Image: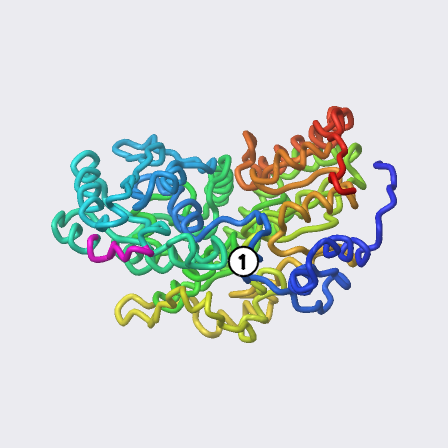
Amino acid sequence: MATTKHMPAPAEVKEELLKKYPPKVARKRAKQILITEAQQAETPEITANVRTIPGIITMRGCTYAGCKGVILGPTRDIVNITHGPIGCGFYSWLTRRNQTDASAPGAENYMTYCFSTDMQDQDIIFGGEKKLEAAIQEAYEIFHPKAIAIFATCPVGLIGDDIHAVARKMKAKFGDCNVFAFSCEGYKGVSQSAGHHIANNQIFRHVVGENDADKPGEYRINLLGEYNIGGDGFEIDRILKKCGITNNATVSGNSTYDQFASAHKADLNAVMCHRSINYVADMLETKYGIPWIKVNFIGAASTAKSLRKIAQYFGDRSLIDRVEEVIAEEMPEVEAVAADVRSRTDGKTAMLFVGGSRAHHYQDLFAEIGMKSISAGYEFAHRDDYEGRHVIPDLKVDADSRNIEELEVEADAERFSSRKTPDELEKLKEAGFKFKHYDGLIPDMDKGTLVVDDLNQYEAEKLVELLRPDIFCAGIKEKFSIQKLGIPMKQLHSYDSGGPYAGFKGAVNFYKEIDRLVNSKVWGYLKAPWQEHPELSAAYVWE
């Protein structure tokens, strides 16, 4: 059992975080820092999805990063060309640890390549459309891919290159290669969340529904918002296959062009990362009749709950029984390791500031080994990610939101098919089954914990100084500054060199990893350079 340590009151922590800001900035930031009132109780509104205050070093990424890096990056057989200077082209390389399996005969894998038009000064002045055409032509001649995607960076939007016209021209020229573009200039939205929306729109517009061939397998689902970081998707696929559930398409970990093109052939959409993918889940339901549910395969108990939910939806007794058999086979190892690790981690504390739904999902894993989450937040969330989807009708559409196109989607006259009859849907709802539902992060946080939206570098270090968590979970931007404070830091964007952490085997991996981190003595010996060699003091000459 961890020793009890004194912690300042939440209100004191919030006041301390805001103290250094100018009054106007402090008033704005105060609305993005919320002290939870009670578990599963109505909570105050939190401000989210607003622009970061200029001058503050935030943890966010840009619209281009969300579109290219998050959604399209894990797809192995689409050639992704970044149209812009090579500085942005760095991100056209795979910078996250998305894994893929290209071992099947004839499988293509372009994830290890970096494609960029490398725009120079003259291209910015005279336009880069001809250079883009040449790049698409070269990629086609070398690889002959099924699809080529083009991603606009900030300079492209500023000079007005029409990447969509270029895409249409090259698609018509090739005939056997789908060429489409994303207007995902980095400045276009509040954060990378805008890039997710843009990516969802264009994938739905240009790819989904392109393959009408029947797909084999029973109980077909699409797994949406799973990006196969560190092999998470492989572990989820293993479990689904063991249960007899067919994963028709993953958007977009370990994914292929054909999976996107066949996404309309599934009977259920299971949504992992609510923020990045809820757009396409809604559109698939409207156009093709595929309902969606929120699932979570992070945490052993959550994995079991999600499997049972999928089985309940299909309603087949043989599937329901098989799911229970799989859970019974998998859980003994999980419980044994959790019990062992919990003897050393019980009562320890964690902070989680991770994008997507990870700051929410990973709290389940910590709870399974007796650790408490004392503060959490997202980099690019909207209010519904914090408070639940019931707030969506009340959300205000601001100028930034209007920058992102909303597709007008209608039921497909030929391919729309209700997967359940009205009576079947009503019976499921009467049994407590919820469609298109997500309660958000806040209701699952303990009373008196801090929820901080769009955490910045100063606040991260101040939180660590005041609350001294046993572990801090975030991304690569924060990693080394937190470690210099003598606190172990686990990167949950790309998992450092670890993973998978999803599913049953992933839970075991995570328990052991956290045990090693929070119980390592090295952090107690660590001192920052300025602690070893304090800065020299000085005075102004007139003093």
Where 146 falls versus 402 (above or below)?
above
Residue 349 rendering spot, x and y as whole percentages:
76, 42
Question: Residue 541, how many percent across, how many down?
Answer: 74, 39
| Residue 145 picture quarter | top left
127 or 194: nearer the viewer:
127
Q: Quadrant of the N terminus?
A: top right
The one nearer the camera, 390 or 433, is: 390
Q: Is residue 52 above or below residue 491?
A: below
Give the residues in magenta. 157-166
Is 7 one of the magenta-colored residues?
A: no
Q: x, y (%) of residue 353?
A: 63, 48
Q: Nearer the viewer, residue 372 or 342?
A: 372
SS for callout 1: strand
The residue pinned by badge 1 equals 294
For the point 56% across and 36% down, the residue is 495
In the drawing, does residue 54 fall left or right of residue 78? Answer: right
Res. 245 visible in picture:
yes
Magenta stretch prevailing secondary structure: helix
35 left or right, relative to 98: right
How many labels were placed on the picture?
1
Q: Splitting the image into 4 quarters, where does residue 430 fall?
A: bottom right
Residue 370 in view of the camera = no
Within-10-Å neighbours for mark 1: few <14, some 14–19, many 20+: many
Q: What colour scheme does the image use?
A: rainbow
Disc 1 residue type (three-letter)? Lys
Name, please, the residue furthest toward the left. 173
User: Residue 21: x, y in percent?
Assistant: 69, 56
In this image, 416 relative to 425: left or right?
left
- Residue depicted at 72% across the width and 34% down the height: 485
The C terminus sits in image quarter:
top right
